[in-house]
Image (tube, rainbow, N blue to C red):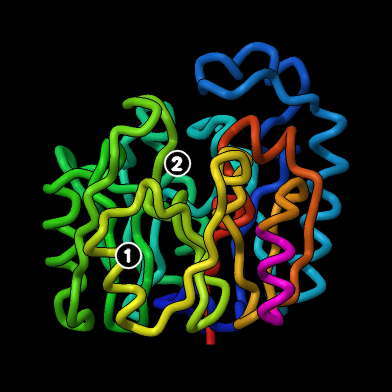
């Protein structure tokens, strides 16, 4: 199969997702485990299913090939957020042990599945290296920005560079703020999402000046989210193709700014499945091929 995803906005041809039935499993399972996964309250399972149905239809209506991760004992609630245990490059998948201990074996389940459908493995970030997919942002096919924070460390970045040095020209290392602390889910893609080749939704308050200036110098229009909409995942959008995105419902100011710029916006109710676990539409998906 075709694979390779060194872009945040090219049209998604193939994608990997995991339904809540295989990740959250049941209300009983949520009741038992939401606190250890540090969710903002226990999700209501039946509401999650309704929210996901709308989200999934956006995916199946717009992406030709949709693959579903099965239930796996090596994974927990967070495995619904398929973006984080790996990155798909044009040379194959790179798997991450991840900084959140409870997600430490997700990469194994994902690797087993993807190799089974024909996506080769380029490598793995080995401990003590740490890395999560939400910290790896493609600027273009040969330029990548990497957030250096609690979830991604220097050793993880070093190994990633070694694995990709033959086809990446520039690495931009972006220091991440302390934010809400070590346990908070703060990735580089928590503060920036490209919605087109020349447009990105951002939360500048958490963005280093040099990186913000770099984006502006590249001609990127920065669409600012305020504190409230950042807190509600308003900077976590999935571009299905240039200028066509999915956004969690409840961020009207970001939505209005996007529409003013000609971006097509599809929204879904996501309080239970996205907000409580801090995983927006990008987190819920792992594009396997963009063209």
Q: Residue at x 31, y 36 (%)?
A: 99
**In this view of the protein, can residue 60 be seen by the observer?**
yes
Give the alpha-carbon distance from disc 2 to disc 1, as whole Å: 32 Å
**Secondary structure category for the residue under label 1:** helix
Percent coordinates x, y for residue 282 in the rendering: 57, 57
Disc 2 crowd rating (10 Å Cα; few below 14, some 14-19, many 20+) is: many
Q: Is residue 227 left or right of residue 240?
A: left
Residue where numbered disc 1 is placed: 212
Q: Residue at x 37, y 34 (%)?
A: 104
Q: Is residue 130 left or right of residue 22?
A: left
Chief secondary structure of the magenta portion:
helix
Percent coordinates x, y for residue 141 in the rendering: 35, 83
User: What segment carries the magenta color?
Assistant: 254-262
Percent coordinates x, y for residue 48 in the rendering: 79, 36
Percent coordinates x, y for residue 5 in the rendering: 45, 75
Q: Is residue 167 left or right of residue 204?
A: left
Disc 1 crowd rating (10 Å Cα; few below 14, some 14-19, many 20+) is: some
Query: Camera-side residue: 280 or 215?
Result: 215
**Secondary structure category for the residue under label 2:** helix
Residue where numbered disc 2 is placed: 106
Circles 2, 1 touching at the beta carbon (< 8 Å): no
Q: Residue at x 27, y 73 (%)?
A: 214
């Amino acid at each position: 199969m075709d694979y390779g995803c060194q872009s945040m906005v090219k049209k998604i041809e193939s994608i990997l997702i995991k339904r809540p039935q295989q990740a959250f499993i049941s209300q009983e399972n949520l009741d038992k485990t939401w606190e250890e996964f540090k969710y903002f309250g226990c999700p209501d399972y039946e509401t999650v299913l309704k929210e996901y149905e709308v989200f999934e239809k956006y995916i199946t209506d717009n992406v030709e090939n949709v693959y579903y991760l099965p239930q796996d004992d090596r994974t927990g609630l967070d495995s619904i957020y398929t973006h984080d245990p790996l990155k798909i490059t044009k040379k194959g998948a790179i798997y991450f042990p991840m900084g959140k201990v409870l997600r430490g074996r997700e990469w194994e389940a994902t690797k087993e599945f993807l190799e089974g459908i024909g996506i080769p493995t380029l490598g793995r970030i080995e401990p003590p290296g740490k890395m999560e997919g939400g910290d790896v942002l493609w600027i273009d096919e040969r330029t990548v920005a990497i957030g250096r924070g609690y979830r991604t460390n220097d050793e993880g970045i070093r190994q990633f560079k070694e694995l990709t040095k033959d086809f990446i020209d520039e690495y931009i290392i972006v220091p991440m703020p302390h934010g809400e602390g070590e346990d908070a889910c703060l990735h580089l893609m928590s503060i920036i999402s490209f919605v087109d080749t020349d447009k990105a939704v951002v939360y500048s308050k958490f963005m280093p000046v040099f990186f913000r200036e770099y984006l502006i110098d590249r001609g990127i229009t920065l669409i600012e989210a305020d504190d409230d909409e950042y807190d509600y995942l308003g900077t976590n959008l999935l571009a299905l193709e240039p200028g066509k995105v999915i956004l969690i419902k409840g961020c009207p100011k970001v939505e209005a700014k996007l529409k003013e710029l000609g971006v097509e916006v599809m929204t879904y109710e996501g309080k239970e499945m996205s907000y409580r676990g801090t995983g927006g539409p990008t987190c819920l998906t792992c594009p396997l091929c963009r063209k």
